[in-house]
Image (cartoon, rainbow, N blue to C red):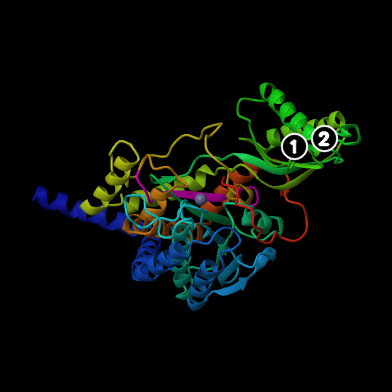
Amino acid sequence: MKMKILLTLLTTILFVSSFAQPKKAGANKEAAIQSVNSHQQELIAISDKVWAFAETALRETQSSKVLADYAEAQGFAVKRGVSGMPTAFVAEFGSGKPIIGIIGEFDALPGISQKAQPTREPLQAGAAGHGCGHNLFGAGSLGAAVAVKELIASGKLKGTIRFYGTPAEESVGGKIYMARDGLFKDLDVCLDWHPNPEIAASTQSSQAMIDFIVEFKGKSAHAAADPWNGRSAVDGAEAFTHGVNLLREHVLPSVRMHYAIKAGGDVPNVVPEYAKVWMWVRDSKRSVVDEVFARVKEIATGAGLIAGVEAKVTVQTGDYEMLVNLTGAAALQKNLEILGPIVYSPEEIAFAKKIQEVQGKDQTGLDGEIHPLKDTKEHPEGGSTDVGDISWNVPEITLVATTAPKGTAWHGWAVVACGGMSIGHKGMLFSAKALSMTMVDLFENEALRKEIRTEFDQRKGNVVYKAYIPEGLAPVPTDSKPALK
Ligand SMILES: [Zn+2]
């Protein structure tokens, strides 16, 4: 009898608690997961096509078209060629608030063409390859957007979903041009993900950086017969780089300065008329980058005076550091925990271990686990990203997901290999699910959106976003190799 009462009580508690659960949220997330599952083959096909096209920054014509065409076929209104870049596009579905954005990249890297196999062999010698996994990035984000679109179409969610096709991450940073033009401004929240050796709701920032050219113009003369009539542009460049190297000791330890000499005369017996240095300054804070850049500009002026030549500094582009949003990351983390780890087949683990063996790394295989949220580092290591610029316009939530084994050299052939087979596909589909589930939260939960916005406002403070790039048209493709961030 006692047992019976206990059972009745338990049933009642279970009934009440299940009744109290936000059932709708569960159902919509479940529907989002099912959507990604039902489009799985299409998403893999898109990713594989972009992987095979392997088009570099601003030349991603076919890759951009595959993604934009699919969005259009799925019922999105697509605007192509935004911000003056033929391969940039925006795909939108739904109407009114909230407006949730999601980013997709698709540019490849030069010179690292690779077959989808665990030993080094180019698909086409000297050609480009997806060494940063952007083929997965674009297709995965679009898969998430389609899942949300279906929920809006069936009336289960209200608002607007917007997918941004953002080109040239590996060079000029297409997002900076789109941010400069205000394309993200009306979003409530923006999401992105990136291929990685492990899964995480990102709590880390990135490096702010400025990319600029320093040119020196002198006067040519015979280097032996009348050098006094000449003024050497190379002297200007040498004085400049020397000045920069003296400056190194007097900047914060978090500052990084690196340059390449792009032009420095042609022959020894002519006083060089022209010299060109391409330089980047980075720090974990844009405010520090600005201070160092001001000093570097003075050094350029000083170098011009020393050599008696003209010195000119031209800013090409630059990234803000990522403004992290821990409220958003925590919401994403919950969905990662619901999804659980990525499970790999013995063949996939063997593929990963072979790569690790070839690269002389520990043969740990793949990490598909869900780890706890990490603490935010004040000075994170690593490179820069143009997602940083978006994150100062609207709150940004970033996921990283496993698409390659640990220890793999990024921007390298092994990342290309994994991105063209099931290891990469699994990471992409996992990301599409996790991001669509988090977007479901954002659409359904106004309080969460407010909390995310409050944190964004606090972190941003009174900083007014201003892109490093000058006003005017976006750049057109050139023959110069894209810079790798
Ligand atoms: Zn990348």
In the rendered image of this protein, does residue 298 appear above or below residue 123?
above
Residue drawn at the location 74% of the way across and 27% of the way down: 243
Residue 236 image point, x, y percent? 80, 34
| Residue found farthest to the left | 1
Highlighted magenta segment, given as a residue range: 391-405
For the residues labelled 2 and 1, say whether their Cβ atoms are less than 8 Å apart: yes
**Place of residue 355 in the rendered image (x, y in percent of width and height, measured from the top left):** 32, 45
Query: Foreground: 444 or 436?
Result: 436
Q: Residue 480 or 26: which is nearer the viewer?
A: 480
Residue 96 appears in the picture as rendered: yes
Q: State whether residue 258 is above or below residue 67.
A: above
Q: Can residue 185 be seen in the rendering of this structure?
A: no
Give the secondary structure at mark 2: loop
Residue 119 relative to residue 413: left or right: left
Residue lying at the far top in this picture: please name it: 249
Give left or right: position of 409 versus 458.
left
- The local crowd at label 1, few if under 14, some if 14 to 19, many if 20 or more residues have their Cα within 10 Å, is few
Residue carrying label 2: 223
**Residue extending furthest right?**
229
Q: Circle 1 sits in a helix, a strand or a loop, which is it?
A: loop
Q: CA distance from mark 2 to mark 1?
A: 7 Å
Residue located beneath label 1 in the image: 268
